[in-house]
């Protein structure tokens, strides 16, 4: 299989200091693109330029030439709709890695309580992580200051109990009713953990203070190793190239097949720019709106917007049916459930609205 990639909202490195974060985190990082078993059609660039009415003076096909503005604007774009039809008609799949940046920055708090499962949380760790993200997202400034005070993610072993007690204090101070069983379970988990003498947080010691995200290379590597028999063509990303050049990316004695190219020289990467742009806006839209708001917005969509949304759903479902590994998310369970309801009309827990 041939896989092509581009990314959107790549903050590259996320640092936390006393004055706050060095980059905005409202929009998710998305590494996305297209995958094909038989190769892209020989006339892909020419046919797409004609179909999408892209001027000959444009050096390449990009999302910004198809749609500008919001996700809702993209859904209303005839060019985006035609693009999705072209992908469907040519038996091409899409793939994505969707990373909620705030969630990825704090999930090690819960994951550090899981080795050996002393608190019995493994069966519902996704619910606990999601609930922690919910509370933090409601008052991220105060929580980030808490993390700064403990040099997160480099918590001193002697301060583990104090760190967890401060998290519990933060949770108790939020004016939020218990939305589901996950709320009291989260609080009880942190309370119980704070009382375990000598408890260590294995993913939060001996790290660089304030370095929430070193880079996004783990997500590039994840795709390489998950699809180790495929060829991978990434858009040029200098920092990631340097990181991967220092890693032995092999399957046994075989070097995995990957390359970084200037997008102007790869129609597959250009197509992936459109996919990444659309999926970045899609997941940003789902992440930033409650389910009642999403449902209300969907009711007000035009026929053109609903058609494009349905094409996107068909493409995602077809790609997922081919291989569930094509669609990868590191995001709160609540966000994934909202996406299920909004895009797929699936039933979700009542507390989501």
Image: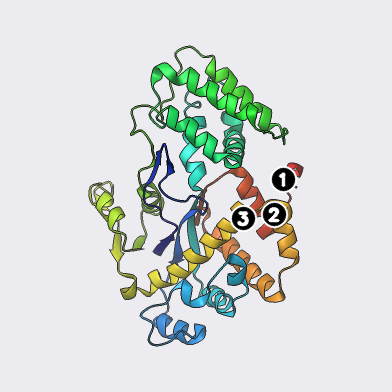
Task: Return the x and y of residue 200 as percentages of the image width and height.
Answer: 43, 20
Task: Return the x and y of residue 135 as percentages of the image width and height.
Answer: 61, 37
Residue identified by numbered label 3: 286
Q: Is residue 117 above or below residue 53?
A: above
Task: Return the x and y of residue 178 as percentages of the image width and height.
Answer: 72, 32
Q: Secondary structure at mark 3?
A: helix
> Who comes first in sequence, dot 1 or dot 3?
3
Res. 58 image quadrant: bottom left
Please state if 167 lies on the left or on the right of 157 as rendered.
Answer: right
> Who comes first in sequence, dot 2 or dot 1?
2
* Closer to the eye: label 2 or 1: 1
The residue depicted at 65 percent of the width and 53 percent of the height is 289
Q: How many C-alpha atoms fall within 10 Å of the one at disc 2: few (<14), some, or many (≥20)?
A: some
Q: Would you say residue 345 is visible in this rendering? A: no
The residue depicted at 40 percent of the width and 47 percent of the height is 22
The residue depicted at 60 percent of the width and 58 percent of the height is 285
Residue identified by numbered label 1: 352
CB under 8 Å between callouts 2 and 1? yes
The residue positioned farthest toward the top in the image shown: 197
Q: Which mark is residue 43?
A: none
Residue identified by numbered label 2: 341
The residue depicted at 66 percent of the width and 51 percent of the height is 338
Q: Is residue 283 above or below residue 57?
A: above
Res. 317 image quadrant: bottom right
Q: Secondary structure at mark 2?
A: helix
Q: Would you say residue 261 is visible in this rendering? A: yes
Task: Return the x and y of residue 92 as percentages of the image width and height.
Answer: 49, 70
């Amino acid at each position: 299989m041939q896989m092509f990639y581009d990314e959107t909202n790549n903050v590259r490195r996320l640092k936390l200091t006393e004055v706050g974060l060095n980059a905005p985190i409202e929009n998710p990082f998305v590494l996305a693109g297209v995958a094909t078993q038989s190769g892209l059609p020989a006339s892909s660039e020419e046919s797409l330029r004609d179909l999408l009415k892209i001027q000959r003076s444009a050096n390449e096909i990009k999302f910004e030439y198809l749609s500008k503005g919001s996700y809702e604007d993209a859904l209303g774009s005839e060019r985006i709709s035609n693009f999705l039809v072209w992908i469907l008609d040519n038996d091409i799949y899409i793939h994505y890695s969707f990373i909620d940046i705030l969630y990825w920055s704090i999930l090690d708090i819960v994951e550090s309580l899981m080795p050996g499962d002393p608190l019995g949380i493994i069966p519902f760790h996704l619910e606990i992580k999601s609930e922690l993200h919910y509370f933090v997202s409601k008052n991220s400034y105060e929580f980030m200051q808490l993390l700064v005070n403990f040099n997160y993610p480099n918590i001193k072993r002697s301060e583990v109990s104090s760190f967890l007690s401060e998290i519990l204090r933060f949770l108790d101070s939020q004016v939020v009713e218990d939305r589901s069983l996950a709320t009291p379970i989260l609080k009880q988990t942190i309370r119980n953990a704070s009382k375990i003498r000598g408890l260590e947080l294995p993913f939060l010691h001996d790290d660089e203070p304030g370095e929430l995200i070193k880079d996004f290379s783990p997500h590039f590597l994840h795709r390489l190793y998950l699809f180790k028999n495929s060829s991978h063509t990434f858009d040029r990303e200098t920092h990631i190239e340097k990181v991967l050049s220092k890693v032995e990316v092999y399957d046994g004695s075989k070097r995995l097949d990957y390359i970084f190219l200037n997008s102007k020289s790869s129609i597959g990467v250009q197509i992936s720019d459109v996919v990444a742009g659309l999926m970045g806006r899609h997941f940003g839209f789902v992440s930033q709106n409650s389910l009642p708001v999403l449902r209300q917005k969907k009711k007000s969509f035009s026929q053109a917007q609903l058609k494009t949304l349905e094409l996107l759903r068909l493409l995602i479902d077809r790609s997922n049916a081919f291989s569930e590994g094509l669609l990868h998310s590191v995001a709160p369970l609540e966000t994934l459930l909202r996406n299920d309801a909004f895009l797929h009309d699936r039933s979700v827990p009542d507390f989501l609205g």
